[in-house]
Amino acid sequence: MLFIKIRTAISLGMINLARVLIYRIGLKFGFNPVKTISAKIEKDFFFDGSRLNSKVRLPFNTDWLQQQKYFGWKVISSKDIPIWYKNVLTQKNVRTPFLSWWSIPDFDPELGDIKGVWEASRFDWVLCFAQQAATGDKQAIDKLNKWLSNWIENNKPYQGVNWKCGQEASIRIMHLAMASLILKNYFNTQISLLSLVKAHLQRIEPTISYAMAQDNNHG
């Protein structure tokens, strides 16, 4: 293990090591702004389907139609809203799902690979429901707004495992932005959606340097 850490440190280089060190010290002693941010997400519908043309018949992604589909291959036969703190790979739940994200350990052998928890919160389903709604399916837009409201209710800003990674927050923003384009909401974006995006941007900004220091797809 020590050899791996030394090899990783050499590969990163001095500048990136300094970035990591500054970030971790700031996180530990509380002077990194990521520990002081707060956000209020407005409770309202996030996407408006009134601009859609019900006569349009376009193909749409059916991965989340009457089922849940993770990682592009793992199918769960359920129409229910996902349990946002459940690992779909191990079927284990996060033991302390509502702690501040920086208090949650990086690794939990009992839980398994944390990506199994994060997958549902990457918002692949947002695109699927938006595409479905773009064909004029009113139920799809209602479902999209309902699931987003449930996600926010169970993932208060900066609390819980789904706020732990800035890259995961970035993935959510990209999917929300694409859904806004699909649903033609970009000229009249809902305040609730803007507040949701803002909360994510506030989470990402203080950790950009740390992400770049990892010298991988996080930066």
Image: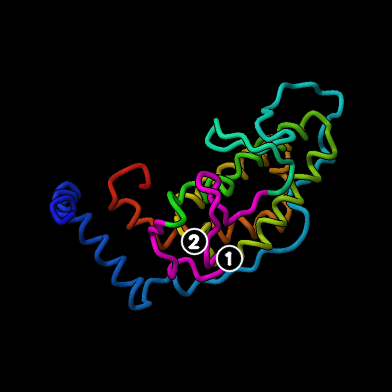
Query: Which amino acid type is shown beneath numbered disc 1?
Result: Pro
Which disc is residue 157 wearing? 1
Task: State which region is magenta.
Answer: 82-109
Query: Which amino acid type is shown beneath numbered disc 2?
Result: Arg
Secondary structure type for disc 1: loop
Q: Dividing the picture into quarters, in which one does residue 2 lie?
A: bottom left
- Distance from label 1 to label 2 (Cα)? 9 Å
In the rendered image of this protein, does residue 9 appear above or below residue 35? above
Is 12 left or right of 27, judged from the image as shown?
A: left
From the image, tell me which residue sits under label 2: 203
Expressed as whole percent of the image width and height from the top left, the position of residue 16 reads: 22, 54
Q: Is residue 158 something that shows in the picture?
A: no
Q: Identify the residue shown where x is 61% and y is 34%.
A: 75
Residue 126 located within the stretch drawn in magenta:
no
Is 136 left or right of 11, judged from the image as shown?
A: right
Marks 1 & 2, CB-CB < 8 Å contact: yes
Is 1 left or right of 138, judged from the image as shown?
A: left
Is 113 left or right of 156, judged from the image as shown?
A: left
